[in-house]
Amino acid sequence: MSLTGQVAVVTGSSTGIGRAIALRLAQDGADICINYVHHAEDANAVQAEIKQTGRRAIVVCADVSQVPQARQLIAEAVAQLGGIDILVNNAGIEVIQPFLEVTEENYDRVLAVNLKGAFFCTQAAAQQMVRQGRGGRIINISSVHEDLAMPGNAPYCASKGGMRMMMRTVALELAKHNITVNDVGPGAIATPINRKTLENPQLLAALKAEIPLGRIGSPEDVAGVVSFLASPEAAYVTGSTYFIDGGLMRQTGAL
Ligand SMILES: NC(=O)c1ccc[n+]([C@@H]2O[C@H](COP(=O)([O-])OP(=O)(O)OC[C@H]3O[C@@H](n4cnc5c(N)ncnc54)[C@H](O)[C@@H]3O)[C@@H](O)[C@H]2O)c1
């Protein structure tokens, strides 16, 4: 149990990848702050599952795109669980729309959740980690689209590209406090965010053909790498992105 005695906050952790990360970090021994914005019942179910493992788990409703709520999320974790050692910025949305038709409203929503939310959660968590004086881990759930262009998804790609440069810069600023900052970049993972593709046999076959390992990833595939980055084994890892994409980035020649 490499994370025993540590506290992890996972944003957007009532579903999908965030849920798998919350469950995995609890298995590793961490106490967990589950965050959700809609559907309290899903968050409560994750909490019940974690409590069965013997770890502490709290549920906090907060819209991370609203800076006061992002700050309150971190404050609640500290007040109820006694501190914060690991922050996973997982909350994210996408609005598929041709670039020529993207509305200001949709642009603002995507950037506010994916980038501004991660920025101010990171700032609040890092301020607390500096006060605690025992280092910390910031792990952003970015995407292959922090590097790989995706026509029809410009605001999302802009948000994840921004997350990459935020991670690289903040990693340098926080290194002196022994706080590491890394991105995890999933490829195609079976979660609600890409239900439309998963439910369309033609789109699914075309997607699989792009993936050298020949399958869609699972939320647990992502959680395993997050677990490693949060663990003592990753103490010397900072400022990088780890793609979990079945080889997609190599296939496309994106990097
Ligand atoms: N599934 C994939 O193929 C894939 C690929 C690359 C990156 N990602 C990234 O993984 C992360 C998780 O996505 P997922 O695939 O699990 O989909 P998901 O829709 O299940 O998860 C997103 C979570 O974020 C939450 N959320 C949305 N807006 C929020 C807000 N304002 N405040 C707090 N929480 C909010 C949602 O309620 C949801 O629980 C996202 O950042 C996404 O961009 C997913």
Image (cartoon, rainbow, N blue to C red):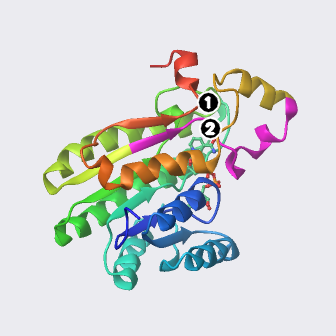
Residue visible at 59% across and 30% down in the picture: 246
Residue 147 point in image, percent of width and height: 47, 28
Q: Amino acid at mark 1?
A: Phe
Label disc, if present, on residue 9 of the rendered structure:
none
Label disc, if present, on residue 102 of the rendered structure:
2
Res. 115 visible in picture: no
Q: Which structural element holds mark 1?
A: helix
- Give the quarter of the image for residue 124: bottom left
| Residue extending farthest top | 253
| Residue extending farthest front | 1
Q: Amino acid at mark 2?
A: Val
Q: Which residue is mark 1?
A: 99
Rendered-image quadrant of the N terminus = bottom left
Instruction: Classify 10 Å Cα crowding around label 1: few (below 14), some (14-19), many (20 and above).
Output: few
Residue 53 point in image, percent of width and height: 55, 75
Residue visible at 66% across and 34% down in the picture: 101
Rendered-image quadrant of the C terminus = top left
Image position of 59 with respect to 126: above or below: below
Q: Nearer the viewer, residue 89 or 54?
A: 54
Instruction: Classify 10 Å Cα crowding around label 2: few (below 14), some (14-19), many (20 and above).
Output: some
Residue visible at 39% across and 61% down in the picture: 87
Q: Nearer the viewer, residue 209 or 173?
A: 209
| Residue extending farthest bottom | 80
Residue visible at 57% across and 74% down in the picture: 50
| Residue extending farthest left | 176
- The span from disc 1 to disc 2 (Cα, nearest Å) is 5 Å
Q: Is residue 249 left or right of residue 211?
A: left
Image position of 67 with respect to 115: above or below: below
